[in-house]
Image (cartoon, rainbow, N blue to C red):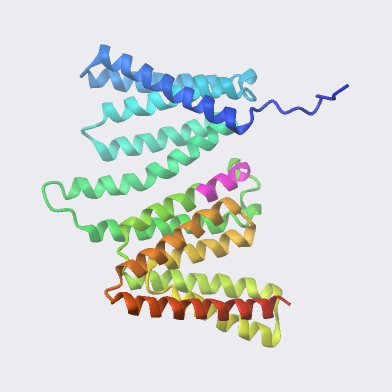
Amino acid sequence: MENNSHKSNHLPWPLLIVMGVGGLTIAALAAGLVALVVQDLLAVYGVLSVIAIICAVAVSQDNLAINDDVLLLLVSFPLFIVGFTFGYIAGSDYLTLTFVLQFVAAVLSFALSKIRLCRQMLLCYASVVLPLIFFSFFDLILSGHAMENRNFEITSFAIIVSYMGLFTATIRDNWFASTVLNDYLKTIRFVTAAVSVVLLWFIHSDNTVFAVVFAAVSFVIACTQLRKYVTGKRLIESSILALLCCASTAMSPAMALPIAGMLLSFWIFDYACLVIFSVTFVRGIAKFYYDLDMLLINKSYLLLASGALFLLMFYFIKRVSK
């Protein structure tokens, strides 16, 4: 007879996706029906937003719902979506304040909720809303004037550095041992990596200052890791190789940042983040070569030279790894 004593209470991921789509459908229908009745009464949207979020947190407090993915995705998840959506509608005229309230609501809901999957969603949402607070603040200041991309660029760089710093801090998991975040370090790494690569869109590809900063960070990370595996002459060779690799990415932030992220992901064997940064790196290289103001034949020569350099790096890596 089959032993089902160790069967998990959680649904497999294909069913989670189906239930998630069902939750989105329920949220869309509920929001649409309420909008038909309430129409332009913004105060009502604000009240309904608070009620929906409170009800979503209350559902996640039920001991029977802790391991019930169906109840989460078909009840609590739609209520959170409806609550945050109505919050945006109610505060559409005060965008910065709305984003701040949304961030606070997400953090409080994370602290009060008991369902792990629900907490992961709220953590991701709070990490996405935080950059929007700063962007909306600049938009408010510069209302009526042309948007200065430099402000967005500097802000994006500061947020990327902060998020990548948080990503690095999760490597020392003992720092979070006594906190509620200890069980969500993978989620933190995933969302900080995803938001960081998205914010690269706001950084100009020819901004060598930012690229040099990212390349220098990559070199420090590489040297830190090399000291754990090689010594003596091989350490010198490896450091020179790391310097060449990192210096070659200093021409574009879209190549320098992913290299730093790939090194950090390899450090802790986080394959999801490694895929994110690897795809971003490939895209950065493709865009760099496409934007070069060169003849096609010269681009071909440059690609051949790059290939030869990568083969040389592969040779040194094989030699060091023996």
Please provide percent x and percent y for residue 282: 46, 62
Residue found at the far bottom of this picture: 233
Please provide percent x and percent y for residue 92: 24, 32
Is residue 77 depicted above or below 236 in this figure?
Answer: above
Q: Quadrant of residue 127?
A: top left
Residue shown at 70% from the left, 75% from the top: 321
Is residue 57 depicted above or below 187 in this figure?
Answer: above
183 within the magenta span: yes
Please provide percent x and percent y for residue 109: 48, 31
Please provide percent x and percent y for residue 228: 69, 73
8 within the magenta span: no
Q: Is residue 231 visible?
A: yes
Q: Quadrant of residue 184?
A: top right
Residue found at the far front of this picture: 297
Residue shown at 37% from the left, 58% from the top: 200
Residue shown at 23% from the left, 50% from the top: 138
Q: Quadrant of the C terminus?
A: bottom right
Residue 272 in the figure: left or right of residue 251? right
Q: Where are the magenta residues, as a range?
A: 182-190
Q: Is residue 114 visible?
A: no
Q: Quadrant of the N terminus?
A: top right
| Magenta region, main secondary structure | helix
